[in-house]
Amino acid sequence: MAGLTLFFDDGGVMNDNLLRGPQWQRLVAEFFVPLLGGTAEAWREANRVIVNRILHPEAFQARMREATEYAGFDRRYQFDWLRGMCELVGIATPPEDVCVQLAHRATAFVIPRVRAAFPGAADAIRLLYNQGYTLHTASGEPSFELAGHLAGMGVRDCFDCLYGPDLIDTFKISPTYYERIFADLNISPSDALIIDDSPDAVQWATQVGAHAVLISNNPSFAETETLFHCKSAAELPALLQRLS
């Protein structure tokens, strides 16, 4: 296990999505009110409603299935996000190109200011890095967002490639996602350890020959020869020491 390359998911593993929501709402309002008008309260509520609408599992899965490439998916997502908020705030929606640019600027403003890391996650990452492990991400979020999240945690320097769907033009919805990451790095799946809170994701990883750790509080979870269990990222160093 000492020679494994580690791949971290973000939300649910390194950062708590439940803590992100209220911070995003506040910071989105802080960014857009001076630029587009409206009240902070209206922007906070609009962000909550539109994000819940877009990220509803069935709607988001359909959005990914309909996309033919990541760049087009991202453009549509950014436009729908800002247009939806403008409509709820009651202000005119800027032209599409302007919306996309503003949405990216807003994201770049918000993400480094959010503090949502799980307790002990950053310390565990730093320890594994200092022990000589090579760390990458394997997330459904794009690489530029991951860079901001890791910078906010203070561990951006611990990671090499920040794999999201934009770097491999493949969504995290099947084993193909991991196959393309491993091919991009030219490593064997058997040399990879995927760390994720999604049972589907760890199953896809093991299907292509990788090792995996499921981050879960489910006490009924059963370990196998290639699939392991931790309650949190903070437990990873102890798990890897035990396995080695």
Image (tube, rainbow, N blue to C red):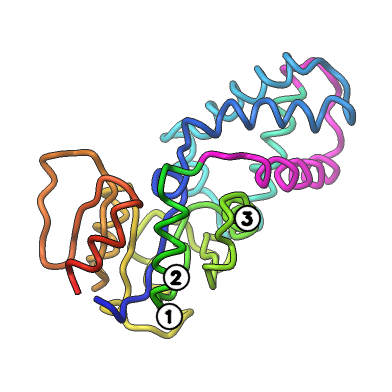
User: Is 156 placed above or below 214 here?
Assistant: below
Is residue 186 at least partly visible in the picture? yes
Q: Main secondary structure of the magenta part?
A: helix
| 226 horizontally vs 55: left or right | left
Between the C-alphas of marks 1 and 2, the distance is 23 Å
Q: Residue at x 27, y 57 (%)?
A: 202
User: Does the residue at mark 2 contact the one at mark 3 (Cβ under 8 Å)?
Assistant: no
User: Is 232 placed above or below 223 here?
Assistant: above
Residue type, mark 3 in image: Ala
Secondary structure of the residue carrying numbered label 1: helix
Label 1 or label 2, whichever comes before in sequence order = 2
Between the C-alphas of marks 3 and 1, the distance is 27 Å
Q: Residue at x 52, y 43 (%)?
A: 63
Q: Nearer the viewer, residue 187 or 55?
A: 187
User: Is 109 placed above or below 133 here?
Assistant: above
Task: Between label 2 and label 3, give the one nearer the viewer.
Answer: 2
Residue type, mark 1 in image: Ala
Q: Nearer the viewer, residue 24 or 185?
A: 24
> In the rendering, at what x and y percent does residue 7 appear?
40, 65
Q: Within 10 angstroms of label 1, few (less than 14), some, or many (20 or more) residues?
A: few
Residue interval drawn in magenta: 87-116
> In the rendering, at what x and y percent does residue 197 appear?
33, 47
Q: What residue is pinned by disc 1?
A: 183
User: Is 167 placed above or below 121 here?
Assistant: below
Quarter in which the N terminus is drawn: bottom left
Q: What residue is pinned by disc 3?
A: 151
Q: Residue most toward the bottom?
A: 186
> In the rendering, at what x and y percent does residue 172 appear?
43, 56
> In the rendering, at what x and y percent does residue 217 appear?
23, 39
Residue 6 occupies quadrant: bottom left
Residue type, mark 2 in image: Tyr
